[in-house]
Amino acid sequence: MRPVLLAGHERALTQIKYNYDGDLIFSTAKDQHICAWFAHNGERLGTYHGHQGAIWTVDVDPTSTILASGSADNTIRLWDIKTGKCLKTWEFPTAVKRVEFNEDATKLLGVTEKRMGHLGSIVVLDVKVDVEAEQNDEKVLTIVCDESKATVAGWSYLSKYIIAGHEDGSISQYDAKTGDLLYNFSIHELNQPIVDIQWSKDRTYFITASKDKTAKLVSAKDLEVLKTYVADTPLNSATITNKKDFVILGGGQAAMDVTRTSARQGKFEARFYHKIFEDEIGRVRGHFGPLNTVAADPTGKGYASGGEDGYVRVHQFDKGYYDFLYEVERERQNKQA
Amino acid sequence: EDADRVNSADVAVVEQRRRILEEWNAWRAVTEEEVAEERDIMGLPMDPVEELIRIKTEQLALDDTEEKVIE
């Protein structure tokens, strides 16, 4: 699994997203531009300039036409992927920490930061996947998080629910049409923030990553915790692989945050777990700092990680990865064949 | 005797995994069926992304023919 190193950011990475076909990678960092890369060779397709602050988040619509980003400059922006042109800017009172398109990219959600005088919120915007279209100024929905601020959020299957992860370690399920809070469950250690949520392909379940050193697989319909993955370091990100039943976790403590010196200080590795059996099955080393973001190629061919060190590392899976099966999995495959 | 003990422990682990895998697959089957039903009722395409890509491809093809007419 020889990685391709993408060196185009000068600051810590914040989020990585593959497009639907898995041939493009979009990355954001604390420097003020978004990068687009070809996944197979790491060549840079382009950069998107305009934000005036750290960029926290990015998402791409399923047809790879437009890009959405959220930044510390208190804006969400929409970009034409092909030309790099900024198509729309929405302004908010605080920083935008997460953006996500729903399954058919008719709507975009944004998570806004809590700050003196402003409660954290989740806003919903109508979007048109058309670079010529006039985009709507108005927010169609605002969900105010008065209990614990939302750190991340996303859209479930059928755009039925908005699922949010909170600073206090709980998750919420909101009705995506009305914004009503349907459920809120504490699933991670109290006051250990949930810092990432990523979806399964069909958006019926998702994985959370928490500073409490665990990641959890949760059903979108009833917020039932299906699986728990236990790590030995605070996590920043978690992703679900397609084709193979694995999850990949990224995290690590920066040296300055490590109070006790340990033999594996930092532990800057991507960790692979079996999605169904919850066992750790392997690690991939490489970054010089914590992994801030991990993303699985939706076509199942590889994954990418973005570090505090400012690098994106793209890995293509090799034969050993595809061949890896538990005895009971092989048994089932043989039965089906 | 020791070998037997190890063996039965292995068998127990495999049994456990078989059960976990069955539970997962059963949950997936139920979930997929439910969502498919809901999509059907709401008149939504089974795969929303495939549908979007189909529309975009059609649009691109249309744009191409339009250009040819201009030439």
Image: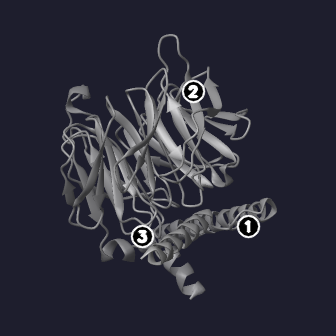
Q: Amino acid at mark 3?
A: Asp
The span from disc 1 to disc 2 (Cα, nearest Å) is 34 Å
- State whether residue A250 appears in this view: no
Which subunit holds the residue at mark 3?
A: B
Q: Are marks 1 and 3 on the same chain?
A: yes
- Name the residue that disc number 2 marks: A121
| Horizontal and vertical percent position of residue A232 | 35, 41
Q: Are marks 1 and 2 on the same chain?
A: no
Which structural element holds mark 1? helix
Residue positioned 73% across, 67% down in the render: B33
Q: Nearer the viewer, residue A176 or A147?
A: A176
- Position of residue A274 relative to residue A229, above or below, is below
Q: Where is residue B15, by image quadrant?
A: bottom right
Which structural element holds mark 3? helix
Lateral position of residue A286 relative to residue A36, left or right: left
In the displayed image of the protein, which residue is found farthest to the right? B41
- Name the residue that disc number 3 marks: B2
- Name the residue that disc number 1 marks: B33
